[in-house]
Amino acid sequence: MPAAAAAITRRQQRCSRWRRLDPGRQALLALAHLRNGDTLTRLAAGFEIGVTTAWRYVREAIDLLAATADDLATAMTRIRLLAYAILDGTLIPIDRVANQKPYYSGKHKRHGVNVQVIADAAGRLVWASAALPGSTHDLTAARTHGIINALTSADVMTFADKGHQGTHGSMRTPFNRRRFRPKLSRRQKTVNRAHAKIHARGERAIATLKTWKSLVKLRCCPRRATAIMQAILVLHHVEAHRYAG
């Protein structure tokens, strides 16, 4: 398990000999938190440790996993080999925070963080971006992370939803009604239906991501959302490769 191996390496670097949990139990603690969404209070009771210790061990394991996550440049080595890619954005709900306005999504009518997800033609999760405040528009988020430029430079045909309209190059978005075009033609409607069937596969990747119950609603500082997403992405790929093998 990557979390256990990382924990062992971390302890060796810090010359830490005495811990309440061994590396395997610490990895299990972090996995229970991420996969099942168990609260730190319940985990502390189950593992017979203090809540503060549980918080410290989970945070340490998440940071170690997140450090091994692929960035977009590394992920592009796999993405450029795909027949086509699917780009979609999702909102990860969070608890209210003191400075809550940037995290309120007018589209979803709730507080959260914006995460951009890239899937392959079968709807398998390939890569997920860092988290941005929920008020960030999908197109702005994709540009901020350099996703559009990376996919265009690699000439990867990418299907995205209406939230990414205004892109260029190899990006494909559906036709949208406008003031000067109140109705779509029959051909445009046909194209939109075909596009929707392809893009719907990207929803599978988001659904797979949200099987990690900790993402149902993040109960931590929003600044921790990126590390949690990256840790989950690492664990997901380990799990996917295991079943593929």
Image (cartoon, grey):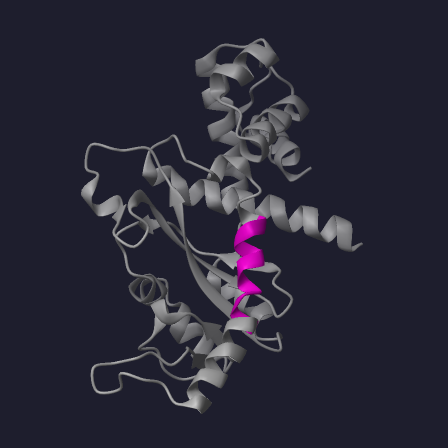
Measuring from the top left, give residue 174's x and y in whole percent: 41, 78
| Quarter of the rendering occupied by the N terminus | top right
Seen at 59% across and 24% down, the residue is 29
As displayed, is residue 59 above or below residue 238? Answer: above
Left/right placement of residue 71 relative to residue 125 reads left
Decide if residue 153 is in sight here: no
Magenta span: chief secondary structure:
helix
Name the foreground residue: 182 vs 32: 182
Seen at 60% across and 35% down, the residue is 6
Number of numbered markers: 0
Residue furthest to the right in view is 245
Left/right placement of residue 92 relative to residue 119 reads left
Give the magenta-colored segment's residue range: 198-208
Seen at 51% across and 27% down, the residue is 58
Decide if residue 158 is in sight here: yes
Measuring from the top left, give residue 221's x and y in whole percent: 33, 33
Magenta segment includes 71: no
| Quarter of the rendering occupied by the C terminus | bottom right
Left/right placement of residue 158 relative to residue 11 reads left
As displayed, is residue 92 above or below residue 152? Answer: above
Measuring from the top left, give residue 126's x and y in whole percent: 57, 60
Magenta segment includes 206: yes
Measuring from the top left, give residue 243's x and y in whole percent: 76, 50
Name the foreground residue: 244 vs 214: 214
Name the foreground residue: 15 vs 45: 45
